[in-house]
Image (cartoon, grey):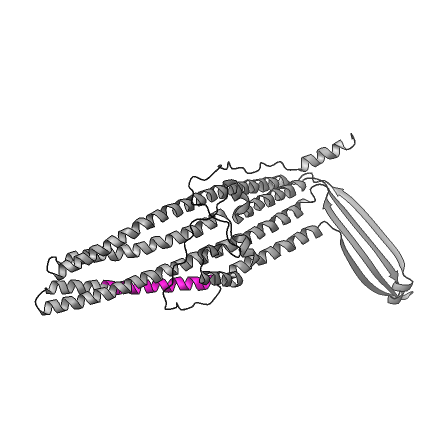
Amino acid sequence: MKRLLPLLLLMSACTPHLQAPSVAMPDRYIYSVPSAEPLPDGGWWLIFEDELLDSLQRRALAQNRDLQVALSRIREAHHTISTARASLLPALGVEFEAESARQPLTGTNNEFLLSPTVAWQTPLLGWSYPTQQARAEYMASEWAYRATMLTLTHSVATTYFTLIEASEQLAISRQSLRLREQSLALIDSMVHYGFSSGMDREQARSMVSEAAADVEQYTMLLSRAQLSLSTLLGDVPQAVADKLYILPTLPRGVPTNLPSELLTHRPDLMEAHYNVEAAAAKVGIARSARFPSLSLTGQGGLFGKDVKDVFTEGDWAWSLAGSIAQPLFAFGRRKRSEQIAREEYRQAALQYEQAVLQALEEVEQALLSVATLRREAEHYARYVEQNERIASLQQALYERGMSNYLDVISTQQTWYASQLQYVEILIQQYQAVADLVLAVGDGWQEGEQK
């Protein structure tokens, strides 16, 4: 045991002592939503029960270029592991040499040499750190792929909801344009028979122009949403279909895990975790460079006067050499390299801790949005109904000569704006549910199966 003590002390000295990242996790979230069943098999977006959204997600998972790049990085990291493992093994080679010389007394002298070679150099301590770093980087790339997958499906869903929002608002603006054109025709008739003034007609015309401008605006927004969706799907830009998109089913709730389960569910947190492991391995590599390394070289060969003799009657010769090298003085280069690696580890650990805090905030923000927007939408639905009744009553009063047209304009504008705002709140509910799935970190499992 006493003979092993120096070796154990040397191995302990080579091991870097690093402080692991730590974040105090709360026992539960501040805000909550109604409990829900686990996410459906086949894709988290199936909670909306929308066949068109499901088909869009399938196309995106199959064709999106960013997702394919992330998958390629997994393969690259896998090859890096093999490279790191190969660096621990000897390098084998073979050399063939031919030499011919002529002397006046001896004549022409030929020599041929077939020489296998072997070389192996490895640190005596910390030889496993390069493989550990490569393995950690491989796992980080796998979780980065899952994070890209979850982000992609979230972006497809939210862009699809934006497309629906623009479609709904375009339909409202077109309906408003038709109503205002009918109102203008009525006022023209009233002016013709002297029941209304030219001022009312000009005000009605301005209302028509405003609605026509809104139609153009929401047509542009609809087209922009379609262009964004085409890019996410991996397609060339597509023209928007001239149809009314229907709002899908709004789920009552989304399953949320305990805060502590975020650490193993969110792909970006797992990626950051393995980045910390890779940084720790880099510290080990930098530290082991300050300790002895072993080098072995070997060479053998078959000699002959003729190429045929090399393989039949050639003489065999070989040599083997080994050395142990201990760095002594390099003007602080190795020490500074270790210090740099330690600072990089500290940065990775702090980034992981910040990512955990950011994840907790995103979950709370999403939970708050889901709960608040649901109540806000209920109140706003009644507000829209009330504005519609007020606008109808005000129009009837004007047609009976009991009100002026400015009051009609005011009530119609309020009703029109409230309809557009209500659609925006509805869409925010769907986007908040998608944000909650992204924040919790579930949903990549189903996409990975695809």
Residue 242: x and y in percent read 36, 69
Whether residue 104 is visible to the viewer of this picture, yes or no, is no
What are the residue bounds of the magenta stretch?
210-237
Residue at x-position 47% and y-position 50% = 437
Q: Main secondary structure of the magenta part?
A: helix
Q: Is residue 9 above or below residue 48?
A: above
Q: Is residue 44 above or below residue 284?
A: below
Instruction: Locate residue 266 relative to residue 220 in the image: left or right.
Output: right
Whether residue 13 is visible to the viewer of this picture, yes or no, is yes
Residue lying at the far left of the rendered structure = 194
Quarter of the image that includes the C terminus:
bottom right
Residue 257: x and y in percent read 50, 44
Residue 232 magenta-highlighted:
yes
Instruction: Locate residue 285 relative to residue 119 in the image: left or right.
Output: left
Quarter of the image that includes the N terminus:
top right
Residue 185: x and y in percent read 17, 68
Camera-nearest residue between 118 and 47: 47
The total number of labels drawn is 0
Residue 175: x and y in percent read 27, 64
Camera-nearest residue between 368 and 309: 368
Camera-nearest residue between 262 and 1: 262
Residue 207 magenta-highlighted:
no
Q: Is residue 134 above or below residue 398?
A: above
Camera-nearest residue between 326 and 340: 340
Q: Could you say which quadrant of the image residue 9 lies in?
A: top right
Residue at x-position 41% and y-position 50% = 432
